[in-house]
Amino acid sequence: MRVSVVTPSYNQGQFIQRTLESVASQDGADIDHVIFDGGSTDDTVKVLKRFGNGIKWISEKDKGQTDAVNKGIRATDGEIIGWLNSDDIYYPNAIARVTAYFEAHPEVDVIYGMADHIDLVDYAFEPYPTEPWNFERLRDTCFICQPAAFFRRRVVEKHGLLDEQLNYCMDYEFWLRLGKAGVRFAYLEEKLAGSRLYAENKTLGARLKVHGEINDMQKTLFGTVPDRWLWNYAHAVIDERIDRHKSPRWFALRMIIVMLKAARRWNGHISPEMRIGLRDLWRRFRNRS
């Protein structure tokens, strides 16, 4: 079974050597690793050149991460596709475990495993919150860790590539789009990857933009946005502006205002569950000094 690993890259020279090594150390399949770099200005290209013939790579200006991943998918022909960012790593034997599962379960189109959040020196400081497959639950929270997910090429041939209009939640949209279409997912309860989490990475560095994009994406796919994502958005708006411990009543009031505006913006109404949640929020904070 041939596995194509696609790595989008841009100015991740401090990490990419470890990413490359984590792929090169895999076995259990014929592995094709391609890197599409967006014209890095750090030492990324030097690392790629030094790594040798075990990889294929190109460094040129692109339209961003989503464009790079799609280019990589188009440039490869493996039956199975993995997407590993240039600051993430595979754990030993990850691909062998995945290919064995795919071979034993031909009806399954997407496999995702367990993972860790890792720091700058690859230390696993907490488990990624993965969960068994449940499509309705996926609408409320993205429990699929992208570097620990693999999918058959027939999935993109039938359902398309990543949405290049998205900058932050392209993977989440992809899983939701596939789940909505009835694609078969399977949860492999083994740790497959380390997903790097640090203050400068794209998701943590643009929290409000991330949550706004997720809400827009859910609205486009389903016509509504789950209340949980509206709460997440409100926290992204408020948390850095108001200390809930120093100004609890002001925090609660601002949360309520933002939640009401968000509900009307994305859903056109306030759900009964949200009304109860907002009422409970005010009761919890109104008597605090």
Image (cartoon, rainbow, N blue to C red):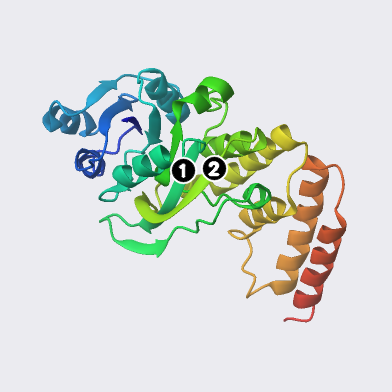
Identify the residue at image location x=43%, y=30%: 65
Is residue 103 found left or right of 284 in the rendered image? left
Q: Which mark is residue 111?
A: 1
- Mark 2: which amino acid? Phe
The percent position of residue 272, horizontal first and vertical second, equals 87, 58
Q: Secondary structure at mark 2?
A: strand
Whether residue 122 is situated above or below residue 203 in the rendered picture:
below
Q: Are marks 1 and 2 in contact (CB under 8 Å)?
A: yes
Q: Secondary structure at mark 1?
A: strand
Looking at the rendering, which quadrant does residue 88 occupy? top left
Identify the residue at image location x=78%, y=81%: 287
The answer to whether residue 41 of the structure is visible from this angle is no
Q: Residues within 10 Å of mark 1 (few under 14, many from 20)?
A: many
Can you say which quadrant of the picture contains the N terminus? top left
Identify the residue at image location x=52%, y=28%: 155
Q: Nearer the viewer, residue 153 or 44?
A: 153
Whether residue 149 is situated above or below residue 39 in the rendered picture:
below
Q: Which mark is residue 123?
A: none
Can you say which quadrant of the picture contains the C terminus? bottom right
Q: Residues within 10 Å of mark 2 (few under 14, many from 20)?
A: many
The percent position of residue 154, horizontal first and vertical second, equals 49, 25
The percent position of residue 142, horizontal first and vertical second, equals 57, 49
The answer to whether residue 24 of the structure is visible from this angle is yes
Identify the residue at image location x=52%, y=33%: 167
- Residue of label 2: 185
Is residue 1 found left or right of 236 in the rendered image? left
The percent position of residue 170, horizontal first and vertical second, equals 53, 35
C-alpha gap between disc 1 and disc 2: 6 Å
Q: Nearer the viewer, residue 222 or 17?
A: 222
